[in-house]
Image: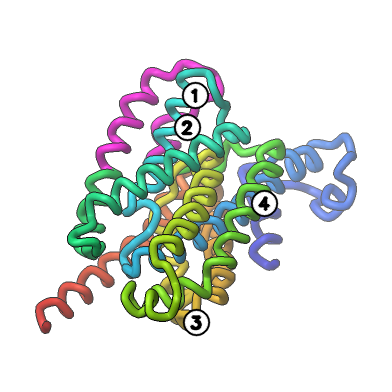
Amino acid sequence: MALVALSLSVGATQIDGLLSALLHPSANTSAAEILWQIRIPRIVTALIVGAALGIAGALAQGATNNPLAEPAILGTSAGAALAVVIGVMTNVVMIGSVGAMAVAAIGALLATLLTLRFATLDRNVSPLNLVIIGLSLSATISAIVGLLTTAITRSDARSISFWSFGSLALTNSSDLIPLLIFTMVGIALALFVAPKLDLLSLGDATARHLGIDPRRVRRVALIALAILIGAAVSTVGTISFLGLAAPHIARLIGGPKHRPLILQSALLGATILLLADTLARTIVSPIELNVGLFTALIGAPILALLVRNRQSSWSQS
């Protein structure tokens, strides 16, 4: 709540009478307009998207049984972005619409399945191959997205930097309802599959002996992942590393069980993204920085440490 209050009170424009503007949303004042038309929708979007990305990271790691997995590494985010760009170019969808979220979810799911398909050796997903192929696929798709965005002339199209780092600058209140609906559906599926992900972490063979079909569990988890990422990317673009950082921090706090992990990852993801966005729009105000820069400052060192520890364990084995 303190962070929300701080985010409400700071910005490029100083608001006089903040409490009055907050309590009287229909007042015909510039303070009420800035608060209710710009800052509050942006704060709510940051909380919802941050929660979606945190849960998506937990699902990606649980479904692949890989601590390095996250939507940006699996190609999930890039697939969602590519689907939205194609939809905008063909005049099928508009950014932030229900249609954009649907096509983004489809693109996210297809890209993730493609990564898993190429990373599978002898019916087992190779952790090293998963990271290498996922990063390669993400880079390839991101390059295609960059090329395609230069050809978009529609007024509602985002800039290349939007897709590269993500931005909450263009969010508005009309985005909130479809974003919330898609995110709640993804959360419901995530909580449903969470106990089975606990068994999946013991290995596919053990899960089968316990009566769990690993392929079915992964399918549900990846559908939930795609819905969450589709909603987030279609609204604010690609924000990397948050899906990696939030679940690992949550594991340190509450342990590896997936149902509490999902809820804690949602809370941490929402908090981190709101803090990052507040810094992005205020630290050099009135110039606004990309929020992805700040989430990367948190997530990138964590990724580097995980890779280092992973390599150390391989060498010892």
* Type of amino acid under label 1: Val
Give the residue at mark 2: 84
Crowd tier of the residue under label 2, counting other residues whose Cα lies within 10 Å: few below 14, some 14–19, many 20 or above: many
x and y, in percent, of residue 57 in the image: 44, 61
* Type of amino acid under label 2: Val
Q: CA distance from mark 4 to mark 1?
A: 25 Å
Give the residue at mark 3: 253
Horizontal relation, residue 2 to residue 23: left or right: left
Q: Is residue 288 visible?
A: no
Question: Would residue 28 be counted in the magenta stretch?
Answer: no
Crowd tier of the residue under label 4, counting other residues whose Cα lies within 10 Å: few below 14, some 14–19, many 20 or above: some
N-term mark: 4 or 1:
4
Question: Would residue 155 be counted in the magenta stretch?
Answer: yes
Horizontal relation, residue 21 to residue 170: left or right: right
* Type of amino acid under label 4: Val
N-term mark: 3 or 4:
4
Rendered-image quadrant of the C terminus: bottom left
Give the residue at mark 1: 88
Q: Are marks 3 and 2 in contact (CB under 8 Å)?
A: no
